[in-house]
Amino acid sequence: MRTGEEVRDSEKKDKGGIVCAGNFIVDRVHTLSYWPEQGDLAYIQHQDVGVGGGAANVVTDLASLGFPAKLAAAGCIGTDIDGGIVKTRLQNAGIDVSGLRELSDRATAHTHVMNVPGQNRTFFYHGGANDAVTDALVSPAVFADTGYRLFYLGYLMLLPGLDGIDTEGRSGASRLLEAARDAGLTTCVDFVSSEDPEFAAKVGAALPYCDFLIINEIEAGRATGVTVRDTEGELNEAALLTAGERLLAAGVAKGAIIHAPEICFWFAPGAKPIISRSRPVEPADIVSTVGAGDAFCAAVLYGLHEDWPVERICVVAHAAAARCLGGATATDGIPDMAVLLEDVKRTHACA
């Protein structure tokens, strides 16, 4: 390590940091000529290998944004080639990987992502080491003791070792988030859009230990029992208002942020919701929708850590999601924060 690097690391220690815990997945993204019927053949026109999952995407996006403090990863990987891919990608981005447990009896989680440009992607997923993550394997206090300030956990509903509810009504996620709070960390949580019939109960167990919740409109609907889109797919904004108030009532302490392609609602106790509308993205500019929600989340965490006004956080988060749509993997479309701020300035000047 050079002297200049030592100085920068010292500065980052003094500025706090964000630890991202949860899913670490190797994504193999296949761009198809079309979606085939069963028994048919479609050409794979392009392939990309990326590191995905809630925690991996968010921490990598933060690094790409030039986050000015420390970043760390916490979770489980296997002792295999894919585990090496995860560690190498994160280390090359300057992320501390000491919180990644290597399990010899589990394969690193991996996903085959089937992408047809202009259509929703389809995932074939093997949980592997992610399925072994429990609250006993992640130590928030270790990060708090070294100056970190925010603790992100994602995705709930894709971490069975944390999602299950015990006889006392507690989940592993609730215990992990409580431990993070007790250590002095601000807790931030994201879900995945699971079809699990126990979705509301499982995520509900964690909400009283969540400071900030950052989820999409589908997840907000499933967590609260509110129908947020009609049969034509149109967003029901009044329903989202109801969903946000229910999330606060369920225990989210500081902010429930619900984002959709069209809009973002930011709910905080005792305050009117703050609404931010996105700028449309031309379909021809969309390479893949993989990771757009994580890009939005990463920008929110950046702004929270830096104490930005909510309105600024929301417009920058929309810009991050829009940039992500131009990349083939979940993270390769994310630029430096200075570029996002220029995007925001330009779009507002054109409004």
Image (cartoon, rainbow, N blue to C red):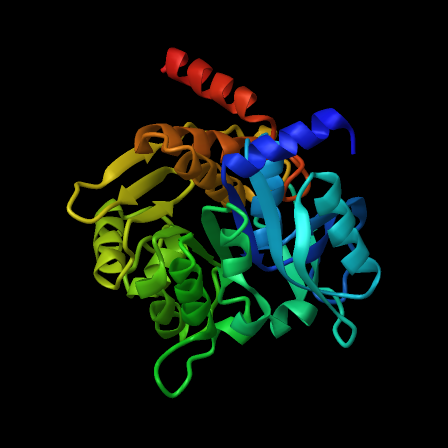
Say if residue 190 shows up in the picture: yes
Q: Is residue 227 depicted above or below 115 in this figure?
A: below
Nearest the eye: 28 or 24: 24
Q: Residue at x 20, y 49 (%)?
A: 269
Quadrant housing residue 304: top left
Q: Residue at x 42, y 63 (%)?
A: 177
The C terminus - image quarter: top left
Quadrant housing residue 95: top right
Q: In the image, is 258 to the left or to the right of 81?
A: left
Q: Position of residue 156 (x, y in %)?
A: 48, 64
The N terminus - image quarter: top right
Nearest the eye: 202 or 43: 202
Q: Position of residue 294 (x, y in %)?
A: 52, 45
Q: In the image, is 277 to the left or to the right of 195?
A: left
Q: Position of residue 320 (x, y in %)?
A: 51, 33
Q: Residue at x 36, y 27 (%)?
A: 312
Q: Is residue 99 depicted above or below 261 in this figure?
A: below
Say if residue 32 shows up in the picture: no
